[in-house]
Structures are given as structure tokens and as C-alpha cells.
């Protein structure tokens, strides 16, 4: 397996884990920044009207910062497609990029809009 090859099924990509740890050590989240993010999240209200382009909402049941119910409410309010991952966390494309690619491919092919 080459350096650019994806890991085999069931294997963790240790390079990704190492890179993420290194980034967190080099650029830790400050208390002030965390407070700003929490304040912004608490005040956020999505627009009532759906954006002009079609929308696909991807969510995960184990996303701690954003409850899946929030994504469901946006999908209902905007009458748009919603796909929910059964176990990934907040970093859905990193947690299960293969899963993300499949509903996006299906949706862009016209099968989910």
C-alpha cells in the first residue's frame, strides 16, 4: 500500500490521527475562541427561506456540538434532502468520508433532490 492509498477497511488512518493531534497541539482552541463559538451557535437562527440552490443536509446521530434534531428541523423548514449517519461525530467527512461521498453522489445524480 502506497502513502496516498486509503487504508484497508477496518483500519484507522494513523497519519490522519497524527496530523490532527499535531494541529491541536500547535493551534489549541483558546477559551476565548471557544466562548465566541458557543455564543455564536446559541444565537444562530437559520433563514426561514431555503437558499436558492438545492440543499442536501448531512448530519450524524453522534454529533455532540450540533444535535441531529437541529439538522432535521432545517431540512423540514427548507423542504430539502436529509441524510443521517448512524454513528459518526461532528467531523463527518473525516469520520466516514466514504459514507459522505455516497449520498452526495446519489443526490448530485438527481436521485435525492
Image (cartoon, grey):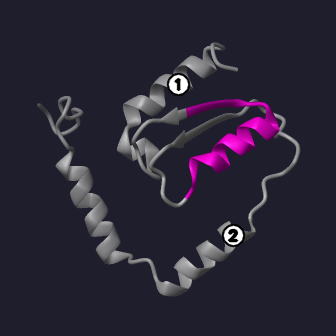
Above-or-below relation of 33 to 8: below
Residue 77 on the magenta segment:
yes
Above-or-below relation of 46 to 30: above
1 or 2: tag closer to the N-terminus: 2
Residue 9 on the magenta segment:
no
Residue 58 place in picture, x, y as percent? 57, 38
The residue under the point 73% across, 44% down is: 74
Determine whether, in the image, residue 104 is placed left or right of residue 53: left
Q: Nearer the viewer, mark 1 or mark 2?
A: 2
Residue 93's disc number: none
Quadrant in the picture for residue 35: bottom right
Residue 18 place in picture, x, y as percent? 21, 59
Mark 1 residue element: helix
Residue 42's disc number: 2
Residue 82 place in picture, x, y as percent? 63, 32
Which stretch appears magenta? 66-83
Classify the position of the C terminus by image quarter. Answer: top right
Q: Residue furthest front?
A: 69
Q: Which residue is mark 1?
A: 103
The residue under the point 63% across, 47% down is: 69
Amino acid at each position: 500500500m502506497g502513502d496516498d492509498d486509503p487504508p484497508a477497511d477496518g483500519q484507522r488512518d494513523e497519519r490522519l490521527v497524527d496530523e490532527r493531534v499535531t494541529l491541536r497541539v500547535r493551534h489549541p482552541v483558546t477559551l476565548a475562541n471557544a466562548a465566541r463559538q458557543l455564543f455564536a451557535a446559541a444565537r444562530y437562527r437559520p433563514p426561514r427561506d431555503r437558499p436558492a440552490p438545492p440543499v442536501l443536509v448531512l448530519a450524524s446521530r453522534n454529533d455532540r456540538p450540533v444535535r441531529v434534531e437541529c439538522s432535521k428541523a432545517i431540512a423540514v423548514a427548507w423542504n430539502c434532502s436529509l441524510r443521517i449517519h448512524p454513528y459518526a461525530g461532528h467531523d463527518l467527512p473525516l469520520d466516514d468520508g466514504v459514507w459522505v461521498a455516497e449520498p452526495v453522489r446519489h443526490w448530485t445524480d438527481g436521485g435525492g433532490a
